Image (cartoon, rainbow, N blue to C red):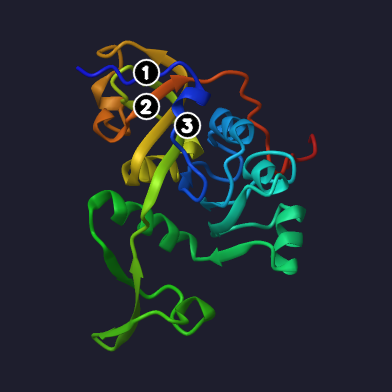
Amino acid sequence: MINKVVKNADEAIHDIHDGAVLMLGGFGLCGIPENLIAALLRKGVKNLTCISNNAGVDDFGIGLLLKTRQVKKMISSYVGENDEFERQLLSGELDVELIPQGTLATRCMMAGYGIPFFPTPAGVGTEVALGKQIVHHKGKDYLIEEAFEADFALVKAWKGDTAGNLIYRSTARNFNPLMAMAGKITIAEVEILVEAGELDPDQIHTPGIYVHRIFQGEKYEKRIEQRTVRKRL
């Protein structure tokens, strides 16, 4: 069995180049590849296209890459917590494609399945439909959406093994598994790394066949985007 372990995040992203198209897993600030984002900051790659559910916040997640002007284009479904994102969008510094969340997920999934395009009713009659083909089926209009083509998928899992099999926890399963299937090269960071054969096969969410590199991350902040609590009764 192939051992896919690399030393750290810096080694894992050694071939990510200026102008690369990246998928970054996570939902809000949950399950984001914190170590890989930090490595991208250190490397200083520029003109990146980032495909992500969100754009992070001003001082965390993808927001850090926006702050250093390393992102040329954001493809997201939610960007409401980032003032720097808003400033760059309104000033014309950042190219932005906002798409429905279900369409974002399906474009990732179709890339993993090898299906180049698919019909969806989401976005018909809105700005999302501009420039896209519309087909009519059984009395209803559908947009033709294309699968993503990403050079790299950067994902974060709770536990993985040396063969690249991954297990996620809770909300981290929303986009990480879909993106792990879809990248031409998939890089996974995990909190716990074990030897191949130690994971329960019934618990594996992403089979190692999709993962090209894996390493054990460190110092996870796991920040909460919007802390909401109820009053004590």
Amino acid at dot 3:
Ile
Residue situated in front as seen by the camera: 204 or 59: 59
Q: Which residue is mark 2?
A: 213
Amino acid at dot 2:
Arg
| Screen quadrant of the N terminus | top left
Crowdedness near tag 1: few (<14), some (14–19) or many (≥20) residues, C-alpha within 10 Å: some
Give the residue drawn at x 62%, y 19%.
219
Q: Is residue 153 above or below residue 118?
A: above
Give the residue drawn at x 59%, y 47%.
46
Quick check: marks 3 and 2 in contact, CB under 8 Å? no
The Cα–Cα distance between marks 3 and 2, rounded to whole angstroms, is 9 Å
Crowdedness near tag 3: few (<14), some (14–19) or many (≥20) residues, C-alpha within 10 Å: some
Dot 3: what SS? loop
Q: Is residue 113 above or below residue 1?
A: below
Amino acid at dot 1:
Val
| Screen quadrant of the C terminus | top right
Res 5 label: 1
Dot 2: what SS? strand
Report if residue 157 is visible in the image: no
Give the residue drawn at x 42%, y 63%.
103
Q: Which residue is mark 3?
A: 13
Report if residue 210 is visible in the image: yes
Say left or right for 122 vs 2.
right
Say left or right for 66 vs 189.
right
Q: Position of residue 147 (x, y in %)?
A: 33, 60
Say left or right for 6 vs 229.
left
Quick check: marks 1 and 2 in contact, CB under 8 Å? yes
